[in-house]
Image (cartoon, rainbow, N blue to C red):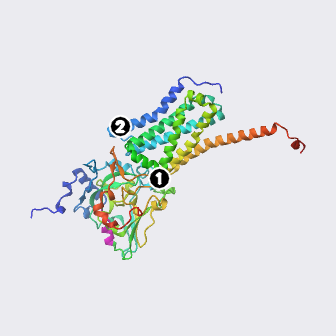
């Protein structure tokens, strides 16, 4: 048969060569080349927005914006603080504890955590609750990979993620802006969805500290704050986790935090967004444009109440 | 000292200095979008809103600081720049509102109406701006004369309400870290508190004087 399966496509055919080599370098640097070099999947964002009958393209947001315009309060509350205050943040050694209602609880070194999975490049839209957005080429693997590996008990209904709590290394944690450590969570069926990722890199490079190095979650149909950066603990529970922003301002930030142009934040509209680098605003898409893929997760759920 | 009078060139120098932030932000927005520079960072319109908003509060602070500084240090010459500082507060508020309406809302009247009705911090900010308008309109010497000094002064006490609303607007707009609104609140608390103390002293002194005028015989014998 001459028909190529998608798996036979070499990633160098669909990504610029320079990026490809960067990625090889990244994998080598991370000590992961052996396991991950086989294939790198590549997924483009589906369902681009339209405006005035025109299809709006999802172009990659420049690396400079992705790495200098960040909300990561552990390193300060201004957008430019994380890039400045995380210089020299050490991510080696790094361990991730898997705990709670799970058959194989364990503390992994970062390498052991990542190794069994195949890294893929995924280009996702990223929508901040503050009504700005980016398009980011992540490097990571599906959350479901890890979940299947550690085998949650049947009583586990939720998964909780925790950021490192170390005010010495994360100066933002010296002031009580949020309840540290930053805690987020998902329903287990949300976490099992193939779009939900653990990311270890972006733009073919290892994550920089301001983006949540060395390990973060990416849930592209939810507002950015649902992601957890610099993860050290993952817990399976039967109760809905108490999440950081929900504890801080419950009327503004719910547990679900699904991108939804029809449900406003109390202080601003969510109907439109400013794509970083663009002069005009663009309409925000239901579930950030991933409604076809993830909509079924929320059938019968009142998204106005469960914001 | 009190009789010192500033050189003539000081007024145009202050005027130009006050224009610098506005000129910079306008040039920076244009340059970021048309030349691809990053003067205002990744989200230039948001940054321009925050930048101009802070300058409104700063000019309100400068204008309100004139009287206390004049009285405490005897720098009476400062008085002649107070109107200009107040008018710059109004100019920066207009710029702030223009960036919000033209660039952020993209002239969507419906969105503007919805924001004013639904978002308390916008309602409050807009109320503060609306109150600034009559103060700007009546800032000329002609208008002072027409209104009469007392009525003019009474009207311009609106500025106290405006700074309180402006600070609340800023406070409510920030997401979580209230450090900067707190700093402005502290400065305004001092500038308004100074006036309250002065006013209390004046009324107490006046009351004492009133009592002192007709010496009550009953008290004299007590």
Residue A31 shows in the view = no
- Structural crowding at the residue carrying mark 2, measured as other residues with C-alpha within 10 Å and reported as few (<14), some (14–19) or many (≥20): some
Q: Is residue B157 left or right of residue A306?
A: right
Element type at marker 1? loop
Residue drawn at (36%, 59%) of the image: A222
Look at the image and tell me in which quarter the C terminus of chain B lies. top right
Element type at marker 2? helix
Name the residue beneath numbered marker 1: B175
Residue drawn at (47%, 54%) of the image: A172
Name the residue beneath numbered marker 2: B31
Residue B79 image point, x, y percent: 60, 30
Look at the image and tell me in which quarter the N terminus of chain B lies. top right
- Structural crowding at the residue carrying mark 1, measured as other residues with C-alpha within 10 Å and reported as few (<14), some (14–19) or many (≥20): few
Point out the residue furthest to the left here.
A1
Q: Main secondary structure of the magenta part?
A: helix
Q: Quadrant of residue A211?
A: bottom left
Point out the residue furthest to the front here.
B146
Q: Which residues are magenta?
A: A141-149
* Front position in the image: A3 or A269: A269
* Front position in the image: B66 or A39: B66
Which of pointers 1 and 2 lies earlier in the amino acid sequence?
Answer: 2
Residue A149 shows in the view = yes
- Residue A26 on the magenta segment: no
């Amino acid at each position: 048969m001459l028909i190529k399966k998608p798996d036979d496509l070499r990633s160098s055919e669909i990504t610029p060569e320079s990026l490809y080599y960067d990625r090889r370098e990244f994998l080598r640097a991370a000590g992961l080349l052996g396991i991950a070099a086989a294939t790198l999947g590549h997924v483009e964002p589906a369902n681009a927005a339209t405006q005035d009958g025109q299809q709006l393209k999802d172009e990659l947001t420049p690396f400079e914006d992705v790495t200098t315009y960040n909300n990561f309060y552990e390193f300060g509350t201004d957008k430019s603080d994380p890039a400045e205050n995380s210089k020299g943040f050490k991510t080696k050694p790094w361990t991730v504890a898997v705990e709670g209602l799970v058959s194989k609880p364990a503390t992994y070194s970062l390498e052991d955590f990542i190794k069994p999975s195949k890294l893929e490049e995924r280009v996702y839209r990223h929508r901040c609750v503050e009504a700005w957005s980016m398009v980011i080429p992540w490097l990571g693997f599906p959350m479901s990979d890890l979940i299947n590996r550690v085998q949650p008990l049947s009583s586990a209904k939720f998964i909780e993620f925790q950021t490192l709590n170390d005010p010495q290394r994360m100066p933002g944690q010296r002031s009580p802006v949020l309840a540290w450590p930053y805690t987020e969570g998902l329903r287990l069926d949300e976490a099992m969805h193939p779009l939900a990722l653990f990311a270890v890199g972006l733009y073919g490079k290892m994550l920089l500290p301001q983006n949540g190095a060395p390990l973060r979650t990416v849930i592209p149909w939810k507002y950015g704050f649902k992601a957890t950066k610099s993860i050290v603990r993952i817990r399976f529970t039967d109760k809905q986790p108490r999440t950081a922003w929900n504890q801080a301002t419950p009327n503004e930030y719910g547990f679900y935090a699904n991108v939804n142009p029809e449900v406003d934040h109390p202080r601003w509209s969510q109907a439109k967004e400013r794509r970083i680098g663009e002069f005009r605003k663009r309409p925000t898409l239901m579930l950030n444009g991933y409604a076809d893929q993830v909509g079924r997760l929320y059938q019968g759920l009142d998204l106005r109440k469960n914001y | 000292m009190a009789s010192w009078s500033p050189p003539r060139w000081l007024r145009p120098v202050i005027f130009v200095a006050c224009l610098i932030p506005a000129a910079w932000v306008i040039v920076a927005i244009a340059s970021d979008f048309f030349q691809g520079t990053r003067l205002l960072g990744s989200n230039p319109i948001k940054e321009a809103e925050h930048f101009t908003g802070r300058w409104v509060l700063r000019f309100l602070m400068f204008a309100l600081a004139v009287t206390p500084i004049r009285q405490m240090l005897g720098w009476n010459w400062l008085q002649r720049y107070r109107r200009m500082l107040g008018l710059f507060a109004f100019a920066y508020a207009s710029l702030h509102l223009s960036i919000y309406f033209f660039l952020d809302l993209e002239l969507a009247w419906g969105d503007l109406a919805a924001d004013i009705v639904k978002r308390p911090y916008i309602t409050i900010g807009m109320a503060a701006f609306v109150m600034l308008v009559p103060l700007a309109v009546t800032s000329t010497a002609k208008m002072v004369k027409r209104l009469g000094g007392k009525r003019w002064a009474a009207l311009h006490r609106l500025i106290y309400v405006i700074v309180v609303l402006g600070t609340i607007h800023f406070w409510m707009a920030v997401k979580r870290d209230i450090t900067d609104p707190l700093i402005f609140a502290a400065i305004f608390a001092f500038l308004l508190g100074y006036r309250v103390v002065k006013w209390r002293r004046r009324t107490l002194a006046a009351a004492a004087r009133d009592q002192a005028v007709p010496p009550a015989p009953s008290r004299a014998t007590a």
